[in-house]
Image: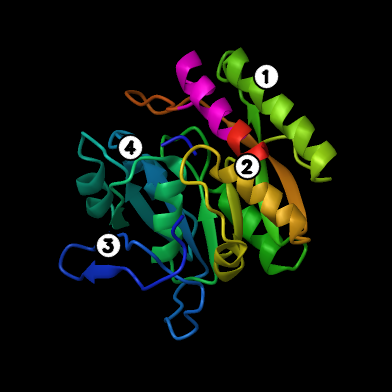
Amino acid sequence: MTAPDGTGAEPATDGSSGEVSAPATAAPEDAGRPRTGRCDVVLPCRDEALALPAVLAALPPGMRAIVVDNGSRDATAAVARECGATVVTESRPGYGAAVHAGVLAATAPLVGVIDGDGSLDVRDLARLADLVESGAATMAVGRRRPVRRGLWPWHARAGNAVICWRLRLRGNLPVHDIAPVRVCGRDDLLALGVQDRRFGYPLELLLRAGAAGWRLVEVDVAYGPRAAGTRSKVSGSVRGTLRAARDFARVLS
């Protein structure tokens, strides 16, 4: 999957299936929860069954995959479980809803977010996590660098450039991409209180992080073709880009 609840209980889990049902609300005040591993990686997914085996196989050591199934019509959840991932079901449509559900299910000190379509390399999460763990960044984010021409449609690339220009002016944020892959502290992220549950989530995240004085470090990451049989829910069509632009405009208003 390509990118107003935040105050309540932990998700319920089914130990037999590894599946987690997203709660209606959740809070960052959960110091008693066990922390396991270095970083939990949230993959918001809708119809990514064909991409997940390769994506999950490349996950760096010390990281746990949390696949959030956001209305898939294929075998996304089943494939994720077969590959050893924790599966969260989020029935509310929207990138932000899926990401938020995954963050609530996370237990590691760090949380990463990346698309599950194979266009970004999950191995880059290790570099981003290093920056956060070392204190060099409060949040480390990736800047997409296409590996060949034609991968990033002009309408999506132009919209991204305009939004990031406004972020640099308005929020003094040193970014050139809207955080398509990122790592930060889980509790820090929940404390920001990001409210958008659609495509505006990463934009609101960046604005709130800037206002909170977070140190953002942006690094180049390779942007390749999506796995065969998958498509972007945003840049794959002009309609998707316009929907994202609508959500971005709402966040910026």
In the structure shown, which secondary structural element does the residue marked by tag 3 occupy? strand
| Residue placed furthest toward the front | 253
Which of the 4 image quadrants contains residue 142? top right
Question: Is residue 128 found left or right of 210 in the rendered image?
Answer: left
Q: Where is residue 30? Give x, y as percent.
A: 47, 79
- Contact between labelled residues 1 and 3, with CB atoms less than 8 Å apart: no
- Counting residues from the start of the chain, the first of labels 2 and 4 encountered is 4
Which amino acid, mark 1? Ala
- Residues in magenta, as a range: 234-248
Q: How far apart are the alpha carbons under marks 2 and 1?
A: 16 Å
N-terminal of the pair, mark 3 or mark 4, is: 3
Q: The N terminus is located in which quarter?
A: top left
Q: Nearer the viewer, residue 221 or 203?
A: 203
Residue at the spot of label 4? 46
Where does residue 230 sit, x and y in percent of width and height?
35, 26
Of the two numbered discs 2 and 4 in the rendering, the one whose residue sits closer to the viewer: 2
Q: Callout 2: helix, strand or loop? A: helix
Residue 102 in picture, x, y percent from top left: 41, 57
Disc number placed over residue 158 in the picture, else none: 1
Residue depicted at x 60% and y 50%:
182
The answer to whether residue 149 shows anywhere in this view is: no
Check the image and report above or below for 28 versus 63. below
Q: Which residue is mark 2?
A: 203
Q: Which residue is mark 3?
A: 20
Mark 3 → mark 1, Cα distance in angstroms: 37 Å
Rendered residue at 40%/45% (across/down): 44
In the image, residue 240 lies in the stretch drawn in magenta: yes
Residue 86 in which image quadrant: bottom left
